[in-house]
């Protein structure tokens, strides 16, 4: 599954629970359900999930 699609899925499944969304995304990445194409910053799954969530809010592909 693509990263944004997984984040959107979790966002709609866990409305308003930011920490749960982030943790669930990180777990999904660790299980191999989503794959990062590159990891130039060396971030772990949880840090990346948090950054992806905030990017989605900032760029409006996750709607609040």
Image (cartoon, rainbow, N blue to C red):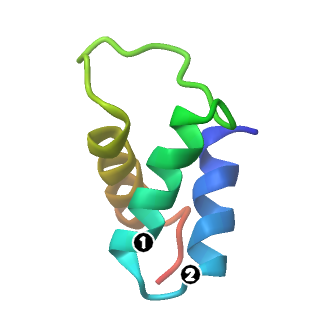
Place of residue 22 in the rendered image (x, y in percent of width and height, measured from the top left) = 40, 60
Classify 10 Å Cα crowding around label 2: few (below 14), some (14-19), many (20 and above): some
Residue that appears at 70% across and 52% down: 5
Q: Is residue 57 left or right of residue 24?
A: left
Place of residue 32 in the rendered image (x, y in percent of width and height, measured from the top left) = 64, 30
Q: Is residue 44 left or right of residue 23?
A: left
Residue that appears at 53% across and 68% down: 62
- Seen as rendered, the residue at the extreme right is 1
Q: Quadrant of the N terminus?
A: top right
Q: Secondary structure at mark 2?
A: loop
Residue that appears at 50% across and 47% down: 27
Residue 29 makes an appearance in the image: yes
Asked if the residue at tag 2 contacts the one at tag 1, i.e. Cβ–Cβ closer than 8 Å, the answer is yes
Disc 1: which residue: 20
Disc 2: which residue: 14
Q: Secondary structure at mark 1?
A: helix
CA–CA distance between discs 1 and 2? Answer: 7 Å
Classify 10 Å Cα crowding around label 1: few (below 14), some (14-19), many (20 and above): some
Residue that appears at 53% across and 24% down: 36
Place of residue 11 in the rendered image (x, y in percent of width and height, measured from the top left) = 57, 72
């Amino acid at each position: 599954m693509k990263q944004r699609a997984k984040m959107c899925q979790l966002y709609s499944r866990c409305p308003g629970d930011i920490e749960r969304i982030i943790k669930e995304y990180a777990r999904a990445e660790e299980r191999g359900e989503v794959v990062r194409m590159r990891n130039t910053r060396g971030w772990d799954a949880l840090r990346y999930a948090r950054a992806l969530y905030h990017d989605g809010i900032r760029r409006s592909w996750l709607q609040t």
